[in-house]
Structure formats: C-alpha cells, structure tokens
Amino acid sequence: MRMGVQSIPVAERPRERLYQGGAAQLSLQELIAVVIGSGTRSASALVVALRVLERFDGIGELGRAEVDDLRGIPGIGTACASRLVAAFELGRRGVLNAPRDRCSLRSPQDVAGYFTESMAHLDREHFRAALLNTKNRLIRSVTVSIGSLNASIVHPREVLKPAIAASAASIILVHNHPTGDPTPSREDIEFTRRFARCGELMGIELLDHVIIGSGRYESLKEGGYF
C-alpha cells in the first residue's frame, strides 16, 4: 500500500510548508519533491526525492546531473528529469547574475569570493570576465566561453568587445579548472600575457587572471606571470 503525501498532515506537506514559511525552511529532500511535483502509484514524491539524493554524492554532483543521469531513477521520467536540470540551471544563473551593489574586486581574494560558488563545481571550463569601472567596482560579469573538459579557446577580442560596450576601465579574467587544481597551464599563461598586451593597446588594463579550483585559487598577477 502506498503511503503518499496525502497521508501527511496538510500543514506538514512540502508545498504547504513552502507556501506558509518560504522555501528556506524546506529540507533538500522536500525541495526536490516540490520540483518533482507528484510521485508514482507506488511511491510519493518524497520517496522519489529520497531516491534521487541516494543516487548522487551530494548536492554538487546532483546539480551537475544531466537528464539521462536522472531518468533512470524509479519515478523519474524525462519530463521530471528535465524540470530538475532546469531548476539547478536557474539556481546557477541566479547566483551568477545576482546584484551585489557594484561590489569592489580589489584583490584575488575578492575575486575568488565572488566567483567560487558558481564556478568551483562546473565540469567544463567556463571563461568569464569581470568588467570594472575606474573605482574597481564590478559593472557586470560576462561568460565569454564554455570549453571542453580540458580546454577553453578564447580570443582577446571576445573579451574586449563587451568591455568596450560597457565602458570598462579594467578587466579581471576568471576561469575554472574542472580538475580542481588551479595551477595555471602554459596556455593560461600565454593567453594572459597576450590579452594584457591587447588590453593595453585598447586602454583597458588587465588587473588579474584568477583560476578557480576546488577549495583553492591561483592569481596569475600574484604569481608574477604577467
């Protein structure tokens, strides 16, 4: 006999708890159950949500799952898997684009603090540029390239074009290493030096290039690479 959500008192059901007190009070299992919406004949949405959590090693791995990774779980079809993948993508974009009152990026620590949450667990290289005004306050950040597991191919003009459009005074380059090791590669160093020269010609200074790893970061400026 199925013990569904209907067997739970109304006030304790995930959706009702969300309506009454907001999403922050829900457990991860309950949040997933809300996204799932409904379970199956043999399992409630909460049970299916628990199966999802048991399949993956933490929220980071779950957030990187693709539709095919999810829909093999009992109770998760293509539509439900798509909703879960979309929900995590919305969360990532929300973190990346959340207004932060023109925060100042004056050190590698500032840069790592701003970008690590949205970049440290990505499974491909994402190359971003922080566009700054004359007071080193962030105008906006732009994603310039999403590469393969091993490399991201970027041309300086792809960074300079949005910088010019935003009237940026300076730029900080940021990208992640999916391996978790932020040590700069030869290609990272060569590109940074080439970009610094191009930026100088355009009157837009390259302040730093920060590589995000797993719990660590590297500043090419502090490392003396350019």
Image (cartoon, rainbow, N blue to C red):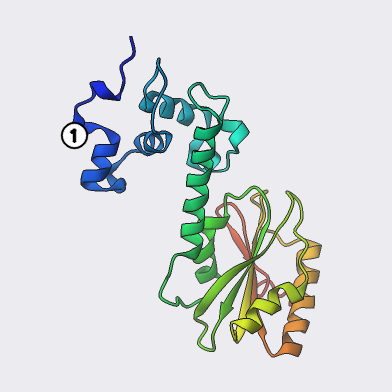
Q: x, y percentage for residue 220? A: 68, 71
Dot 1 corresponds to which residue? Answer: 11
Q: Is residue 50 left or right of residue 170?
A: left
Q: Residue at x 62, y 32 (%)?
A: 68
Q: x, y percentage for residue 116? A: 53, 59
Residues 71 and 175: in front is 71
Q: Residue at x 34, y 35 (%)?
A: 30
Residues 43 and 41: in front is 41
Kindly indicate the quadrant of the structure image that contains residue 12: top left
Q: x, y percentage for residue 172? A: 62, 75
Name the amino acid type tagged 1. Answer: Ala
Residue 147 against residue 186 in the figure, above or below: above
Residues 81 and 173: in front is 81
Kindly indicate the quadrant of the structure image that contains residue 182: bottom right
Residues 44 and 206: in front is 44
Q: Is residue 201 left or right of residue 209?
A: right
Res. 225 visible in picture: no
Q: Quadrant of the N terminus?
A: top left
Q: Residue at x 68, y 48 (%)?
A: 179
Q: Residue at x 52, y 83 (%)?
A: 136
Q: x, y percentage for residue 133? A: 54, 85
Res. 125 visible in picture: yes
Q: Quadrant of the C terminus?
A: bottom right
